[in-house]
Image (cartoon, helix red, strand yellow):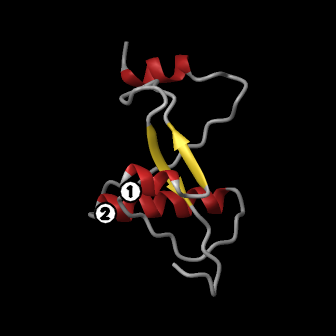
Amino acid sequence: MSWLARRRRAVPVDRPEVRVLINTNVTMSRHKAAAQAVHAALAAFGIDHGRVVVLGGRPDEVRAMDAVVHDAGRTEIEPGTLTAGATLVRPGDEA
């Protein structure tokens, strides 16, 4: 069974799936690709936003963000692994 088939089978059917495609004909760093994916997802839901900055961080820095993501463990990462965090920085806030 392919990775995609296993993934589709593992995801609950009562929850929507968000799909983001990255143009593979464009050469960009993984950080730029991640930022573009965030732009696309926010735009898909009509969320007004400015810059998107994607950086690497230590686990303690990620945990300190306003929202954190722990992977479900259905593909390549152990369940519960802390993978990302996000914080909204408003104009005038310290970055």
Residue located at (70% from left, 56% from top): 45
Three-letter residue code for mark 1: Asn
Q: If the image is split into quadrants, where does the N terminus sit?
A: top left
Three-letter residue code for mark 2: Val
- With respect to residue 59, does 92 lie above or below? below
The image position of residue 13, as x and y in percent, is: 67, 22
Q: Identify the residue at the far bottom of this view.
A: 92
- With respect to residue 50, does 29 lie above or below? above
Residue 48, by quadrant, is bottom right
Q: Which residue is mark 1?
A: 23
Residue located at (40% from left, 49% from top): 59
Dot 1 and dot 2 residues touching (CB under 8 Å):
yes
The image position of residue 64, as x and y in percent, is: 53, 56
Residue located at (46% from left, 63% from top): 36
Q: Identify the residue at the far top of this view.
A: 1
Count up the numbered dots: 2
The image position of residue 10, as x and y in percent, is: 54, 18
The image position of residue 19, as x and y in percent, is: 55, 43
For the residue pair 64 and 42, the one nearer the viewer reads as: 64
Q: How far is mark 1 from mark 2, CA to CA?
A: 6 Å
Residue located at (45% from left, 19% from top): 5
- With respect to residue 37, does 91 lie above or below? below
Q: In the image, is 17 to the left or to the right of 8?
A: right
Which SS class for mark 1? loop
Residue 42, by quadrant, is bottom right
Q: Which residue is mark 2?
A: 26
Few, some or many residues within 10 Å of mark 2 (<14, 14–19, 20+):
few
